[in-house]
């Protein structure tokens, strides 16, 4: 069974940057459209970015122009480069396929605070 492990979160000031990583235990990025999701306290989980097997990407309006999703199939790893972070980006970030095919990992906490 494929496992997803997210990392790279942390505490950052507004305007700062972080790069999140999602490492899979199998070669899934070449066969699935993948996505980053986040869930803030008291809010529903939302999808913030996706990438297709062909490399097409899409972003939630709230992160467009600030976040960049990418994959490295050779490393079974997906990334989320987050720039110009805002208070409202604070959340636990998870990765999964667009179709939520896999179990959720533990996520990685991103806290934007001054």
Image: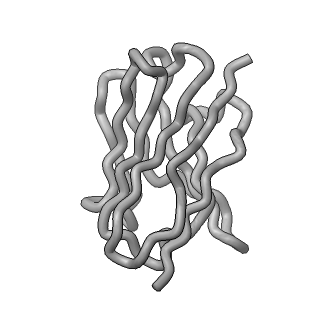
The residue at the point 36 percent across, 43 percent down is 69
Q: Is residue 55 above or below residue 83?
A: above
Name the outermost residue toward the bottom: 114
Quadrant of the image containing the N terminus = top right
Instruction: Kindly identify the residue that appears in the image at 69 percent across and 72 percent down.
Output: 41
Task: Report how many numbered discs are placed on residues in the image.
Answer: 0
Q: Residue at x 34, y 55 (%)?
A: 67
Measured as percent of width and height from the top left, residue 85 is found at 38, 70
Query: Could you say which is closer to the camera, residue 80 or residue 33?
Result: 80
Q: Quadrant of residue 60?
A: bottom left
Front one among 59 and 95: 95
* Position above or below: 39 against 43: above
For residue 58, side relative to residue 32 (left or right):
left
* Left or right of residue 85: residue 94: right
Q: Position of residue 8 (x, y in %)?
A: 50, 49
Residue lying at 49% horizontally and 33% vertically, measured from the top left:
34
Asked which quadrant contains residue 42, the reply is: bottom right
Depicted 12 relative to depicted 73: above or below: below
Q: Nearer the viewer, residue 82 or 48?
A: 82
């Amino acid at each position: 069974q494929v496992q997803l492990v997210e990392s790279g979160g942390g505490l950052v000031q507004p305007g700062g940057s972080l790069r999140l990583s999602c490492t899979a235990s199998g070669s899934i990025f070449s066969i699935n459209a993948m996505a980053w999701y986040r869930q803030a306290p008291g809010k529903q989980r939302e999808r913030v970015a996706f990438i297709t097997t062909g490399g097409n990407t899409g972003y939630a309006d709230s992160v467009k122009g600030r976040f960049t999703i990418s994959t490295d199939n050779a490393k079974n790893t997906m990334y989320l480069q987050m720039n110009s972070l805002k208070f409202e980006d604070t959340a636990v970030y998870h990765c999964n396929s667009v179709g939520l095919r896999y179990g959720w990992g533990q996520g990685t906490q991103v806290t934007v605070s001054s």
